[in-house]
């Protein structure tokens, strides 16, 4: 195994966590966090595919992450559940999971040996989405933060405002006799959208990938609005003037023909960039993300009260440099595989 050494200030030894080619490793506890490759013990922040990978021997995740881990990694996996704030001793370190507000079950993972306290935030957002347990700041000495949307241009509107826009769009499409096809990532964003749809307008039909996530955890995914799976036997007349929720991969596929006449929309943080909608060739874009915006990232960093900040994925260089200018001991680290704006996780 290769160690990717992290620069530390002179005279300071950094022992608790290491950044390796397998991902974040805790030597004292002998476990990895969101490992990139199969390992013996994997602590998982959340169920997205760039964090939860197959073939590790044992997994530890929040209870609410387990249904989706089994759905995606296989029902045979050995996974133990943990509650938020429950403290677990693993070898010589204490580990606890804390709400990250990103998707259902998403967690920041705190690791401490009494000298250093690290928080690995995974992906997070500060706004309460009504489905995941809202983000809670966790005090630490070393904070690992994402920076997916780490530029000042990313400044999210309140979600009520966005839901008004989406419901208004659906209503307008109905008046024009069209079915609305709304694209969103199958895990997280899709469920958040369904929850925000106005049931007085009609019913929601779900692509199989979205339906499977909802079905995997009926206890937690409860909606006022009626939801139905789309099957090959669903008569096309049923979709008339209703709303379809599907993953972006379905865009442009023959599968969409049965919704004719239709119009398309997409809900993504990337819609904040002009030109992105055109590139995706969808009719309408809604700016909605399950990641923190610029202000959210800064707030989370500040509230962690950490002296050492490690910035990973997204606009790492810019965000880390800004933190340095604010007086933080900040540096860029690689904990993920290369991500691009086409990464489904962020749609
Ligand atoms: Zn994620
Ligand atoms: Zn991620």
Image (spheres, rainbow, N blue to C red):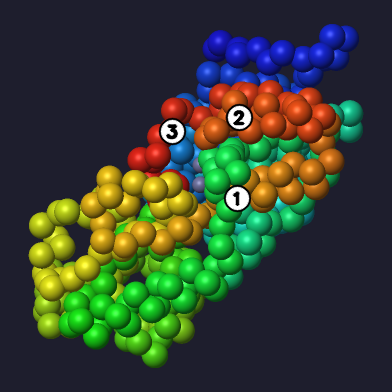
Of the numbered discs in the image, which one, if any, rests on residue 283? none
Disc nearer the start of the sequence (3/1): 1
Q: Image point 79% across, 18% down: which residue?
A: 14
**88 or 283, nearer to the observer:** 283
Residue 187 shows up from this direction: no
Q: What residue is shown with label 1? A: 292
At horizontal 35% and vertical 87% (from top left) the residue drawn is: 201
**Mark 1 Cβ and ligand 1 under 8 Å apart:** no
Q: Is residue 82 above or below residue 90?
A: below
* Location of residue 100 with respect to 133 vertically, above or below: above
Q: Earlier in the sequence, mark 2 or mark 1?
A: 1
Q: Position of residue 196 (x, y in %)?
A: 47, 75
Q: Work out whether 283 lies above or below 35.
A: below
CA–CA distance in space, label 2 to label 1 = 16 Å
Q: Is mark 3 within 8 Å of ligand 2?
A: yes
Q: Quadrant of the N terminus?
A: top right
The reply to whether discs 2 and 1 touch (Cβ–Cβ < 8 Å) is no
**Element class at badge 3:** loop
Report helix, strand or loop for mark 2: helix
* Residue wearing tag 3: 339
Image side of residue 142 versus residue 59, left or right: right
**Residue matched to label 2:** 318
Residue 293 x %, y %: 59, 49
Q: Quadrant of residue 256?
A: bottom left
Q: Are marks 2 and 3 in contact (CB under 8 Å)?
A: no
Q: CA distance from mark 3 to mark 1?
A: 17 Å
Q: Position of residue 53 (x, y in %)?
A: 45, 37
Q: Is residue 153 left or right of residue 190?
A: right
């Amino acid at each position: 195994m290769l160690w990717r050494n992290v620069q530390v200030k002179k005279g300071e030894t950094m022992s608790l966590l290491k950044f390796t080619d397998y991902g974040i490793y805790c030597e004292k506890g002998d476990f990895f966090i969101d490992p990139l490759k199969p390992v013996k013990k994997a602590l998982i922040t959340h169920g997205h595919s760039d964090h939860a990978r197959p073939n590790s021997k044992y997994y530890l995740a929040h209870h609410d992450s387990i249904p989706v881990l089994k759905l995606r990694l296989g029902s045979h996996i050995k996974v133990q559940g943990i509650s938020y704030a429950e403290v677990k001793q693993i070898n010589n370190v204490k580990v606890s999971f804390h709400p990250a507000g990103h998707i259902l079950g998403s967690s920041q993972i705190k690791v401490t040996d009494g000298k250093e306290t690290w928080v690995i935030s995974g992906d997070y957002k500060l706004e309460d989405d009504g489905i995941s347990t809202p983000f809670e700041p966790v005090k630490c000495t070393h904070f690992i933060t994402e920076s997916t949307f780490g530029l000042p241009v990313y400044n999210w509107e309140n979600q009520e405002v966005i839901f008004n826009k989406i419901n208004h769009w659906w209503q307008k499409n109905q008046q024009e006799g069209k079915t609305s096809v709304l694209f969103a990532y199958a895990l997280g964003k899709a469920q958040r959208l369904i929850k925000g749809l106005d049931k007085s307008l009609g019913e929601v039909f779900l692509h199989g990938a979205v339906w499977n996530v909802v079905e995997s955890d009926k206890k937690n995914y409860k909606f006022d609005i009626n939801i139905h799976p789309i099957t090959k036997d669903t008569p096309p007349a049923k979709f008339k003037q209703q709303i379809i929720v599907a993953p972006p991969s379905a865009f442009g596929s023959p599968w969409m023909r049965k919704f004719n006449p239709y119009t398309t929309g997409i809900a993504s943080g990337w819609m904040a960039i002009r030109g992105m909608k055109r590139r995706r060739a969808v009719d309408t874009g809604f700016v909605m993300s399950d990641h923190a915006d610029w202000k959210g990232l800064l707030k989370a960093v500040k509230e962690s009260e950490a002296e050492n900040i490690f910035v990973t994925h997204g606009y790492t260089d810019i965000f880390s440099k800004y933190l340095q200018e604010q007086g933080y001991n900040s540096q860029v680290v690689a904990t993920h595989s290369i991500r691009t704006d086409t990464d489904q996780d962020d749609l």
